[in-house]
Image (spheres, rainbow, N blue to C red):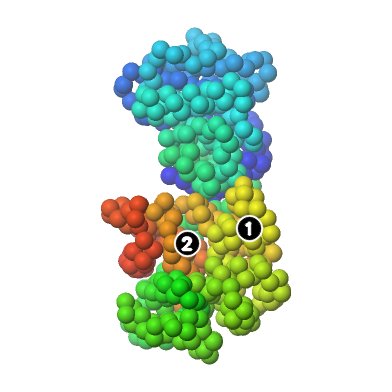
Amino acid sequence: MISETLYLSSSLRHIEAAHADEPLMQRAGAAAADWATTLAGERNRAILILAGPGNNGGDAFEAAHLLRQRFFDVRLVFVGDPGKLPADAAAACQRFLDAGGTSLADIPEDTRWSLIIDGLFGIGLTRAPDGRYAEWIVAANHLAGRDHCPLLALDCPSGLNADTGTCFAPCIEASHTLTFIAAKPGLLTNDGPDFCGEVRVADLGLPPCDDIAPDGHVVSLADFASHLKARRRNTHKGSFGSAGVLGGDQNMVGAALLTGRAALKLGAGRLYLGLLDPSAPAVDPVQPELMMRPAEALLQADLQALACGPGLGRSAAALQLLEEVLNAAIPLVLDADALNLLAEDRRLEGILVKRDNPAILTPHPAEAARLLGCPVAAIQNDRIKAARELASRYRSHVALKGCGTVIANPEGHFWLNSTGNPGMATAGMGDVLSGLIVALLAQGWPAEKALLAGVHLHGAAADRLVANGIGPVGLTAGEVIDAARNLFNEWLIGPHSL
């Protein structure tokens, strides 16, 4: 179970220093040994442990010592100089040796393993592993596959940046990760979810918030539960706001329709679609409740919130409409081509940052790169930094979409979303997300809460579908809409019980 607080490596080192007089390494080793015992089971009881030259290696020595006491056949591989280990790690190594443990210089070739433990680098590595350590990582991945055994990483898979989720090569492909004190952002975004497997937090008996405030949080229902209120009986459609969607140029009307359908089914009282395509249909036969308008007439409606960008295109007419939207005194969701136009015309940036009403930006990495004027790789190499920079520069709330969507506000706070699955990597998913968010804005939700809830719900609805056998392969954006409506209504009935 992931804790709701996130700490960067620098903050964790401050916490560790504040508790230097406590046996943190022994607690980490005990937690690792407990989970390892469960994972190894009663097969051949042979456990391979890779110990590195730092404190992560110390955690491995502690776990090895305890697992030997539990009568596992422990083979610990270590090539460092025990005299050069950090003090706590050196003490752990000595305890292991004094109890009769021995270390090997390389991985045995003639053993079938019930479990492999990665204690090489943890959060301490910020570059690609090399030399013998790189060889061991490759071997560990191969052996785990060969023997169909779990591969447990201590704190963070070796080769993965714990702060950013950037994966170096080679990297441990863990089936399970036991992380210490608190969760690290890199375990939940970018490459992290593909290399961490199941993640658990062992807090080692520490209350980290007593020492230093969290760097970020994992999105949970608690972040917006106070706004999940059942509707009164004495209401009407005007009680739940009017939302607008601006987009749908030629050959892209479907994007705007998805946004509108999602907003309608998440409870907006009225939904107006302003479409740029002059030959767009006058009615949506699937959702006739949507009220179609020519794009230029949309802002004449009495709107409480507006989503702009799905299928908008990048024409001169689209640019002019976007400028009008930015000057509108209502909350906005900007996505897709609205973001591309914003990146191309810096004059619009000046209008955006001077707005009194909130704006929400929902870029994917390529759109974020255009907005910041940098390569896409720079965005992905530090997604948290990019999201915070976007939020600060554009004075907006931001959801940087992708694996582990990063949400940031203009004050620099960030959240990571842990819902969602690979089935969402398909056309139209972002359009549906915009619709969910604008519906909540139209119903009076604050921008930050609407963004947190919309992103979390979007992924959770897709997860629900997959759990019910729909996807992940072939999952469509349209299918997520009804799933989101169903799940949101469940939350309204009892958000604290889900």
Answer with the quarter of the image where residue 262 lies: bottom left
Answer with the quarter of the image where residue 44 lies: top left
Looking at the image, is mark 2 or mark 1 earlier in the sequence? Answer: 1
- The one nearer the camera, 237 or 201, is 237
Q: Which residue is mark 1?
A: 369
Residue 442 is situated, as x and y percent measured from the top left of the image, at 48, 78
Q: Is residue 269 above or below residue 449?
A: below
Few, some or many residues within 10 Å of mark 1 (<14, 14–19, 20+): many
Q: Amino acid at mark 2?
A: Val
Q: Is residue 345 above or below residue 412?
A: below
Q: Is residue 28 above or below residue 276?
A: above
- The one nearer the camera, 291 or 39, is 291
- SS class, disc 2: helix
Q: Which quarter of the image is occupied by the C terminus?
A: bottom left
Residue 483 is situated, as x and y percent measured from the top left of the image, at 33, 64
Q: Which residue is mark 2?
A: 455
Give the residue displayed 44% in from the left and 39% down from the top: 197
- The one nearer the camera, 69 or 319, is 319
Give the residue displayed 63% in from the left and 30% down from the top: 21
Q: Amino acid at mark 1?
A: Ala
